[in-house]
Every structure is written in structure tokens, then in C-alpha cells.
Image (tube, coloured by chain):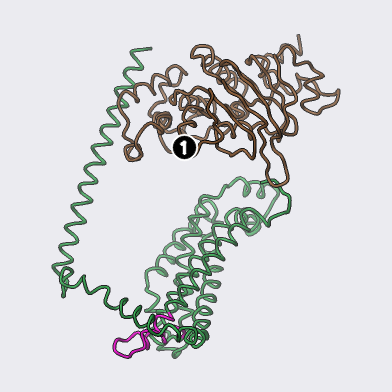
Chain colours: A brown, B green
Amino acid sequence: MLRLTNLTKSFGGNKAVQDANLQVAKPSMIGIIGRSGAGKSTLLRMVNRLTDATSGQIVFEGNDVTALVGAAKRNWQSQCAMIFQQFNLVPRMDVVSNVLHGTLNRRSTLATMFNMYPASDVHKAIDILDRLGIAEHAPKRAEALSGGQQQRVAIARALMQDPKIILADEPIASLDPMNAQVVMQSLRRIHEEDGRMVIANLHTLDTARRYCDRVVGMRDGKIVFDGTPEQLTTSMAREIYGADTSFSEAATSTEIQTLDREYA
Amino acid sequence: MAENVAQIQTDYLGQMRAKRVMNMILLILFVALMMLGFYTADARNAGGFWQGWHNILDFPGDVVSEAVTRAHLLPGYFLKYAPSLLETINIAGAATLLGAILGLIASLLATRGLAPVGWITGPVRRVLDILRAVPEIVIALILIFLLGGGPVPAMIAIALHTVGALGKLFSEVNENASLKPVEGLASVGASWLQRMFLGVVPQVAPNYLSYALLRFEINIRASAILGFVGAGGIGYDLRNTMSWGQGKLDEAAAIFLLLFATIVLVDQLSSHLRDRLTHGARVKGARQ
């Protein structure tokens, strides 16, 4: 389905991502872990084509995504939704308008500039918001919502795109544990109920373990681990994070359950 | 729950429709007022727009044709008028610098949340309003009458207007600055001036710079115009060469080109400096 071949991105002399190879056969939920600066964000941004790859190839369902330009590139971006750490919503516009932005690739520029969307799209947008449990905030401005609610609006925008892949770049890094759980559960549900591929950059190990079918570890721009959560041993995790024996998973956790685990 | 969602959908669509109708009414009103205004203005015009508009290009046409036929003389004219261009730029530069310094202080006093005492913002803003309201040509004429012709009255006149303009623009920039660093500095016991110059100015310096350089461009033009009323500089030369029937239109073209080149230069300088200020000097090998 999705294949990355020798994907490389260099900034000047630095290689942010180096010869990344990844093959995904069926829609699954994949977590990418690694410390800050390991190249996780750059990898996702290259898949969405927000950043151009220096060399290498991204192939999705037989089409070379890296070669797309202009309208074809924007069409690809509409099929490959992105969720950001800082939500990246338009703060002064209402929640429904932000969700309707998911349809921008399908609608004419002039109509959308005057905020003209078909009533069926508005219905669908509010249905999606309801599915994520925030329908009652529909007419509010995005900036009036809490972080967790804003991230769910961003997920709703992604779902409005009706994408084949959802890329989530540190979706819970700015959220408290409760909201983080709600957001991760939403992403998991979308994967299970709609059968969409979800690739999420995560900075806590236990989140990756808990919600993902497959974990990819990156270190200094290279993919150093690719396997199931069970295969991800503590010594492997130390290797990914470049940590010594003082590293323990519970110490980095933001999950509420870890507390029980530690004191039980 | 489903009923609730249906209600939200109906409400939202209703709101959307109301907004759309409102926008439509505003658009129609806007177009109607524009057309009405144009016809009123045209009716009161002595010559009439429709009779005169095809002559609009006559003067630029003459300037261009004279400049083209005597193109070989242009480099000489550039040299001839370079000293007066320098005088014009000097007037603009001194006025911008003086105006920006006073405008910076005024802007900090005119911003709610930053001013040391709350009541001062209103009076400072009114003073800035007055400085902007009086046309600089009026101030220049009065000063030329009092001090005699020359660059100094022009400089003072432009500087006063600049204080008004930059004071307002800077204070709008200040309003968007984050108060968190200011609070941080207050927590270590910094004085008001320390909080402003170490907490606010570093945040807003790139915007200050681009507004100040934009003002510099405007001031170059203003100082050229003041040359028409006896303030010296390139404006005086422009008035002499621009008069129709003197056969000096090629020299006027040379002056226009000089002014254009100056503005382009300032614009380029502005974007370069702004880039330096926002991103810092380029460090070799740094990421991104």
C-alpha cells in the first residue's frame, strides 16, 4: 500500500532523515518513536509533501507520490490528512468552518473564500464533531476551545478530508494526560471503525505500545527498529533513545495508569 | 443525542444563511455607494472625467519619448542630480531617525498594558493624532517662513509627521507583543525602562525596523515634494525640469529614475535587514 524507499532529507550538511525504508501492506496503526530531532516530523512531512524529499521515493498504491506537482500534489495531500502538535487550526474561525476546510481541495477557490459550502457538507462536519464528542462547540471560535478539544477539531478536519492515511505529528505532546487519552482513543477508533491507516509520531513509549499495531524507532535520522510492540524490549528502547541503564519507561510516561503500575 | 445534533445542524445552517444574506446586502450597498460617489464627483469636476481621461497618458508619454530620444544624456543627468538626491535622502534619513526614536518612546506610552501609568495612553494618543493630522507641507511652509528656506525646516516637518505615524504603528505592534517576558522581568525587579527595552523591544524590533524603513521610503518622497516649496533637494530640480514646454522632460525622467532606484534600494535593504533581525546572522552549517 505505502512504500518508502531510501527516503532522505538533508538540510545543508545535516541529514534529518537518512535512507528510510518502510513498507506498509495493509491499513494499520503505526507509531514512530525516537527522541526530539530524530527526524520523525520530517519523515511525516515528506509523506504529506509539506517538505520535499532530497532523494528517495514514496509510493502509494503504485503511484509515485514524490514526483507529484501542482494540482496532483494537492490532490495527494487531500487524501493524506495531517494532524499537528499545535493543532494548526485557524483560531479566529468557528469550529465548523475549520472542519469544512477539510473539503478545500474538492471545492472551488472562489466559493470557499466566501465561506460557501453545501449544506450536506455542513451536516457531515457536525456529524463528525458529534462522533468525536464536541458537537456542542460547533458555532464557537476555534481559539475558545481547550487544547484537547482543538485537537479533536483538527482530527475532525482530517476526517472531513475522507483520507486514506492520517499522519499525526506528536498529536498529544501539548495535551494533559486525560485529553491525550481521549485523542489517542479517537485515533484508534478511526483506525478500527473506518479502516484508515494512521501513522503517529509519539514521544512516549507506552502510548506507542498501548495504541499501535506496529512501532518504528528512529535515531539520528535512521530507522533502527521496526516491529510489533512486543518486540520492543527495554534494551531496544534504550538503543532508540540512546539512553543508558538509568532509563526507565515509567519515568517518561504521561499515562495515568503508570502511577498505579509504579505504586502497586 | 441524535436529535440534539440535528438541532445544532439546523442552527448552524441558519446562522450561515443569515451571514450570507448580510454579506450580500453589504456588497450591494458598497457597489451602489461607489457608483453614486463616482457620479457625484464627476458631475462636480470642472473638466469632466469622460472628456479628459484619454489625455491622462499625454504627460508620461512626453516624458518617455523625450527620455528615449535623448537616452545618451541620461548618465550625465544622473551625475548632475546625484548631489541633490543625496540632500533629499539626508533630509528623509534624519527625519526618519529622529521620528522613530521619539515615536518609539511615544508608542510605549500609548500602549495599554505597557504604559507606566494607565491615564497617559489617551493624551499621548491624541498628541500623535495631531501630529498626523497636520499636513507636513503646512508645517514646512510655516517653518520656512520663520527659519528661511533650506533642508532643516523640511527635516523638522517630516520628523514631526513621522513621530505621529510611527508612534501609532509601533504601538499597534506593541499590542501584539507577548506580556510574558515583561512579567518575567518584572518578577526579577526590573524598572519600567528595563522591562520595555529588554522585554518588549527585542520581540518587536523586526516589525519596528520594517515600519521605520517603509516610513523612510515615504519620507524620501515627502522630502522630494517639500523641495517644490523651497526646501531644497531633488524636489526643487524636479519642479524646474517638469514644467511643460521647457524641453527638459528628459531630465525629469532622469530624476524619476533616480527616485525609483532609491526606493528599490531601500526596499531591498529593508528585507535584508529584517531577515537578519528575525533569523539572526547566518551561522555556517546551522540546521534550516
Q: Residue A221: horizontal and vertical position, in percent?
A: 72, 33
Q: Residue at x 50, y 70 (%)?
A: B216
Q: Residue B79: horizontal and vertical position, in percent?
A: 52, 86
Q: Is residue B246 above or below residue B59?
A: below
Q: In the picture provided, is A256 more to the left or to the right than B2?
A: right
Q: Is residue B116 above or below residue B17?
A: below
Q: Nearer the viewer, residue B215 or B113?
A: B215
- Name the residue that disc number 1 marks: A91
Q: Residue furthest top?
A: A264
Q: Is residue A16 above or below residue B239?
A: above
Q: Residue at x 35, y 83 (%)?
A: B66
- Residue A47 visible in the shown view: yes
How many C-alpha atoms fall within 10 Å of the one at disc 1: few (<14), some, or many (≥20)?
Answer: some
* Secondary structure found at label 1: loop
- Residue B142 visible in the shown view: no
Residue flagged by tag 1: what amino acid is it? Pro
Give the magenta-colored segment's residue range: B233-255
Q: Residue A224: horizontal and vertical position, in percent?
A: 75, 25
Residue A197 occupies quadrant: top right
Is residue B43 magenta-colored?
Answer: no
Q: Residue at x 32, y 17 (%)?
A: B6
Q: Nearer the viewer, residue A1 or A166?
A: A1
Q: In the picture provided, is B4 more to the left or to the right than B270?
A: left
Q: Main secondary structure of the magenta part?
A: helix
Q: Nearer the viewer, residue A209 or B246?
A: B246
Is residue B249 magenta-colored?
Answer: yes
